[in-house]
Image (cartoon, grey):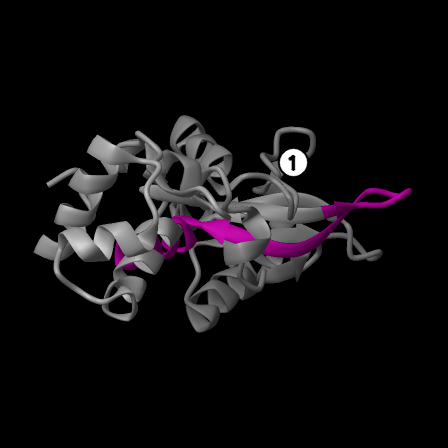
Amino acid sequence: MVSTIELNKRQEQILHIVKEQGPITGENIAEQLNLTRATLRPDLAILTMAGFLDARPRVGYFYTGKSGTQLLTENLQKIHVKDYQSIPVVVNENVSVYDAICTMFLEDVGTLFVVDTNSLLVGVVSRKDLLRASIGKQELITIPVHIIMTRMPNITMCERDDLLIDIARKLIEKQIDAIPVVRKTDKGYEVIGRITKTNITKAFVALGEE
């Protein structure tokens, strides 16, 4: 095997031929394998799209010299936040802690993004924040969520065109479960999405399936 991507025997034979003799035409590869060019066309397409081979008109196929790990790294560098962001769940800064807990439960999320009357981001509330507020004898329905939230400028944010791998690093470094995707305006930051550990996992699974 030349990489962590599972190739069939014929694809491995093609790679060996191209590595040894490239650049080489599809017709010459087919001749050496005693197959027709049409039979090899799907295999050559897979190897080219996967990045193992490259092709140039009137020249032929040649081996890129890249390992499966290198190809995976290149693919990661092409995935942006906008490709996997999900819908954000927001609450107003004046709602009660009790209502925030209900919203988190009903929406089945681990993080709420708090906005002001202009719908601009002013804070973030996590499960831990709500659990901490619940410990004690306070009346949760009388405590506004802005009392317990993490405030600006201590909020980790991202934008649609950021690389997903960079945001994954932030999730790990900050030990948080979600990051708001924002759009910068003249008045502040508008929440337009969210990136969570689940989103990162979906991207990882998609890469594996590809």
Where residue 62 appears, x then y in whole percent?
35, 38
Q: Which residue occupies the foreground of this view, 80 or 115?
A: 80
| Image vertical order of residue 110 relative to residue 24, above or below | below
Q: Is residue 68 left or right of residue 193?
A: left
Residue, far top: 173
Magenta residues span 183-210
Residue, far bottom: 106
Q: Which residue occupies the foreground of this view, 179 or 131?
A: 179
Q: Is mark 1 on a helix, strand or loop?
A: strand
Q: Residues within 10 Å of mark 1 (few under 14, many from 20)?
A: some
Q: Residue at x 35, y 37 (%)?
A: 23
Q: Which residue occupies the foreground of this view, 87 or 35?
A: 35
| Image vertical order of residue 63 relative to residue 177, above or below | above
Q: Which residue is drawn at 35% across and 34% down?
A: 64
Q: What residue is shown with label 1?
A: 151
Q: In this view, does 151 lie to the left or right of 7?
A: right
Quarter of the figure that contains the N terminus: top left
Q: Is residue 14 visible?
A: yes
Where residue 135 appears, x then y in whole percent?
38, 46
| Image vertical order of residue 75 relative to residue 90, above or below | above
Q: How many marks?
A: 1
Where residue 165 appears, x then y in whole percent?
45, 37
Q: Can residue 204 be seen in this view?
A: no
Q: Which residue is drawn at 27% across and 59% down?
A: 209
Q: Which residue is drawn at 58% across and 34% down?
A: 156
Residue, far right: 186
Type of amino acid at the residue the image marks with label 1: Arg
Quarter of the figure that contains the C terminus: bottom left
Q: Does the magenta stretch include residue 18?
A: no
Q: Which residue occupies the foreground of this view, 165 or 209?
A: 209
Q: Is residue 205 magenta?
A: yes
